[in-house]
C-alpha cells in the first residue's frame, strides 16, 4: 500500500510538472492559441454544416471554413485598421498645421455658454483658452509618449506578430478538423464529475459565442452607425471616430455617447442647430438603442451578466491581457459565476454529499 501510494503521488507530481512546463512553452503564443480556440468555437457550426455536405473530406471542409473565416473576420479587420491609421495620421497632421484649432473651437463654445456655466468652469480652472490649451498640451504630451512607445513596440514585434498570426491559422485548421475528438478527450481525462464537465464545457462555448456576438457585434454596429452619421454630417475622420465609438460601446450606460455627445453639444453651442439636433436625435434613438435591441437577441437572457460585472471584467481583462482581455475578462467572470453556481447546487439539501441543514430551533 505504501509503495502504491508513493507511486501515485510521484505520478501526480510528474503530471503537474509536465503540464506546467507545457504551459510555459505555450505562453509566448498564448494569444494566438486563445484566438485560435475562440475562432474554432465560433465557426464550428459552419464547419459542421460543410462537413455534413462532404463527410469524407475533413481536410477540405476545414480549409473551406478557414478561408471563410479569413474573408468574414480577418480581412475586414485589416482593412479597417489600414483606414484607421490613415485617418489618424491625417488628423495628426491637421493638428500640427493648425487646420484643426482646438482653442478656437473651445472659444466658440465658451462664447455661447450662459454665465452660470462660465462660473462653474472658472471654479475648475477651465474658464480661459490658455488654461485649457495648457491642460490639453500636457495630456497630448503624455498621449504622444504612449503612442510612440506603442509604435516602437509594434515595429519591433512585427516578426512576432506574423509568426503568431501564422500559428493561429495553423492551429485553427487542426482545431476545426479534430476539435470534436480533442474536446471529448479533454472531458474524459479532466478530474470532475461528468455533469460538471458537461455544464462547464457548455458554458465555455456559450460564453465565447455570446461575448463575441453580444459584445463585439454590438460594438461594431454602434461604431458603424456612429461613423455613418459622422460621414453624413461631414465630420473629419469618420472611420477613426467609428473605431473609438466601437471601443467605448463596451462601457455600459455611457459608451459611444462619450464621442457623439460632445460633438452634438459643440454644434448646438456654435449655432449649427440642424447638425447638433440631428446628431443628438440619431445618437439617442439609433446608436443608443442598438444595445437594447441587439444584445438580447444575440446573447440571450440566460447568458447575460450584470453590466457592472461586464464593465469590471472587461477593464480588468484588458489591463492584464491587452486587447485580448476584451474576451478573456468576461469569459473568466462567467466561468467564475458558473463554477460557484455548480458548487451551490451541490450544497443544496438532498444533493449527493451535501451536508444536511441544521435543525430549526
Image (cartoon, grey):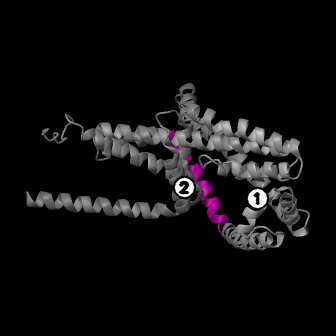
Residue stretch rendered in magenta on the structure: 156-178
What element does badge 1 sit on? helix
Q: Indicate the position of residue 266 as horizontal and vertical percent values.
A: 82, 53
- Nearer to us in this view, 262 or 354: 262
Whether residue 321 is in magenta: the answer is: no
Q: Is residue 156 left or right of residue 192?
A: right
Residue found at x 64% / y 48% = 254
Q: Looking at the figure, which quarter contains the N terminus?
A: bottom left
Residue 91: give its label: none
The quarter of the picture where the C terminus appears is top left
Residue beneath label 1, please?
A: 116
Main SS, magenta region, reads: helix
Q: Is residue 230 above or below residue 139?
A: above
Number of marks in the image? 2
Viewer-closest of 345 and 134: 134
**Mark linked to residue 325:** 2
Asked if residue 171 can be seen in this view, the reply is no
Residue at (34%, 42%) from the top-left corner? Answer: 341
Q: Is residue 316 above or below residue 215?
A: below
Mark in front: 1 vs 2: 1
Q: Residue at x 14, y 41 (%)?
A: 358
Amino acid at each position: 500500500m505504501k509503495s502504491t501510494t508513493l507511486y501515485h503521488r510521484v505520478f501526480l507530481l510528474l503530471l503537474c510538472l509536465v503540464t506546467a512546463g507545457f504551459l510555459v512553452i505555450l505562453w509566448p503564443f498564448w494569444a494566438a492559441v486563445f484566438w485560435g480556440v475562440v475562432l474554432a468555437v465560433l465557426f464550428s457550426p459552419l464547419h459542421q454544416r460543410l462537413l455534413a455536405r462532404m463527410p469524407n473530406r475533413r481536410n477540405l471542409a476545414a480549409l473551406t471554413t478557414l478561408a471563410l473565416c479569413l474573408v468574414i473576420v480577418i480581412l475586414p479587420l485589416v482593412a479597417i485598421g489600414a483606414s484607421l491609421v490613415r485617418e489618424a495620421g491625417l488628423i495628426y497632421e491637421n493638428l500640427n498645421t493648425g487646420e484643426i484649432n482646438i482653442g478656437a473651437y473651445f472659444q466658440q463654445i465658451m462664447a455661447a455658454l450662459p454665465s452660470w456655466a462660465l462660473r462653474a468652469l472658472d471654479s475648475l480652472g477651465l474658464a480661459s483658452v490658455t488654461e485649457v490649451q495648457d491642460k490639453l498640451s500636457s495630456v497630448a504630451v503624455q498621449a504622444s509618449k504612449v503612442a510612440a512607445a506603442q509604435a516602437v513596440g509594434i515595429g519591433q514585434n512585427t516578426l512576432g506578430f506574423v509568426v503568431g498570426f501564422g500559428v493561429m491559422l495553423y492551429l485553427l485548421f487542426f482545431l476545426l478538423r479534430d476539435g470534436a475528438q480533442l474536446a471529448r478527450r479533454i472531458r474524459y481525462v479532466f478530474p470532475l464529475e461528468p455533469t460538471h464537465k458537461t455544464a462547464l464545457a457548455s458554458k465555455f462555448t456559450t460564453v465565447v459565442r455570446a461575448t463575441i456576438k453580444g459584445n463585439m457585434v454590438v460594438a461594431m454596429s454602434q461604431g458603424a452607425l456612429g461613423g455613418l452619421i459622422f460621414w453624413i454630417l461631414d465630420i473629419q475622420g469618420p472611420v477613426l471616430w467609428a473605431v473609438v465609438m466601437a471601443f467605448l460601446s463596451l462601457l455600459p450606460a455611457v459608451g459611444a455617447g462619450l464621442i457623439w455627445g460632445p460633438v452634438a453639444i459643440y454644434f448646438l453651442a456654435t449655432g449649427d442647430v440642424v447638425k447638433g439636433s440631428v446628431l443628438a436625435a440619431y445618437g439617442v434613438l439609433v446608436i443608443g438603442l442598438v444595445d437594447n435591441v441587439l444584445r438580447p437577441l444575440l446573447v440571450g437572457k440566460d447568458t447575460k451578466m450584470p453590466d457592472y460585472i461586464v464593465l469590471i471584467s472587461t477593464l480588468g481583462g484588458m489591463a492584464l491581457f491587452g486587447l485580448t482581455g476584451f474576451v478573456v475578462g468576461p469569459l473568466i467572470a462567467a466561468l467564475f459565476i458558473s463554477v460557484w453556481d455548480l458548487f451551490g447546487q451541490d450544497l443544496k439539501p438532498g444533493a449527493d454529499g451535501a451536508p444536511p441543514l441544521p435543525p430549526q430551533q
